[in-house]
Every structure is written in C-alpha cells, then in structure tokens.
Amino acid sequence: MEKLRIDKWLWAARFYKTRSLAVEEIDKGRVRVNDLEAKPSREVKPGDTVTLRQGTVIRTVVVQGVSSQRGPAPVAQQLYEETEESLRLKAQAAEQRHLTSDPASSLEHGRPTKRDRRSLDKAQGNGWDSRWSASADK
C-alpha cells in the first residue's frame, strides 16, 4: 500500500498553494487524520479520512489516492472524495455568505477628498482666514 506525508498530499491535492502553507495549517491544529491531530510527517494512505479547515469552512475528505506531484486540478480532485456532510456544510456556508452583507459596504464615506475637506472647512468657518496666527496684523 502506498503512503505519503500529509503535507505533500495536501499540496498535491491542491488544498494549499505551497507545502509550507500546508505545514503551517497542520501546526495550527487545523488538519486531522482519522480524528487524530496530524503532524506534517504523518503519512496518509487511501481510505484515510482527512478533516481540514479552509477559512471558515470545515471540509472532510476521504483519501482515494496519493501523488507526490502537483498536477492539474482535475487530476488533483481524483485524489480525494468529499463526504456528503462536508458538501452540505460547504453549500450552506456559501449560501450564508451570499445572504449576509459585506461589512465594508455599510461604510458610506471614507476619508474626505481634498475638495470635500475644503468645503467642510468653508462651511465651518475654519478657512485660512479664520485661523489663529502669531503675526501681529489686526
């Protein structure tokens, strides 16, 4: 039976862009193999269950094959099969993101532009003419 390190497998299956990102996520405890916390050197084989967190979504996949090379996405998707529950939770999270608004969109104005600042100063009477000066002209 063929085995491969979990960090290499996660990279080859295109869950993470680089092996070092995969190692970081494993070290943070966001990856589990067969319900046990994984280390980067942990070996996976076909039939193992891998649970990982990507952003806010928790994905559970069953290892179908191993490959030490990172290939195209269609080939990488053949290395695992996502569980029904995981697919349901992923769809639910996508729908939730779709229904909630982005917090940044609630901000109406950011920092005022130079033109806005000048009009605010003029409206408040804080122009150059009304500023205090150390000069003696009166």
Image (cartoon, rainbow, N blue to C red):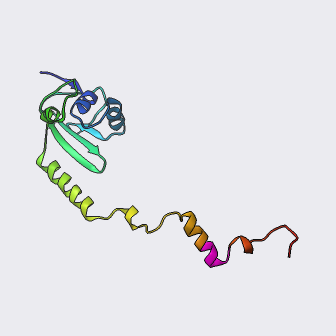
The secondary structure that most of the magenta stretch takes on is helix
- Residue sitting at x 19%, y 43%: 60
Q: Is residue 81 magenta?
A: no
In this picture, residue 25 sits left or right of residue 1: right
**For this rendering, which residue is in front, 14 or 89?**
14
Q: Position of residue 14 (x, y in %)?
A: 23, 35
Residue 41 found in image quarter: top left
Relative to residue 117, is residue 22 depicted above or below?
A: above
Please, is residue 138 above or below residue 31 in the view? below
Task: Pick the quarter of the image with the C terminus.
Answer: bottom right
Quarter of the image that includes the N terminus? top left
Residue 95 percent location from the top left of the image: 21, 60
Residue 135 lies, with reference to residue 7, above or below; the image says: below
Residue at (11% x, 32% y) in the render: 64
Q: Position of residue 13 (x, y in %)?
A: 21, 33
Residue 34 position in % (x across, y down)? 19, 37
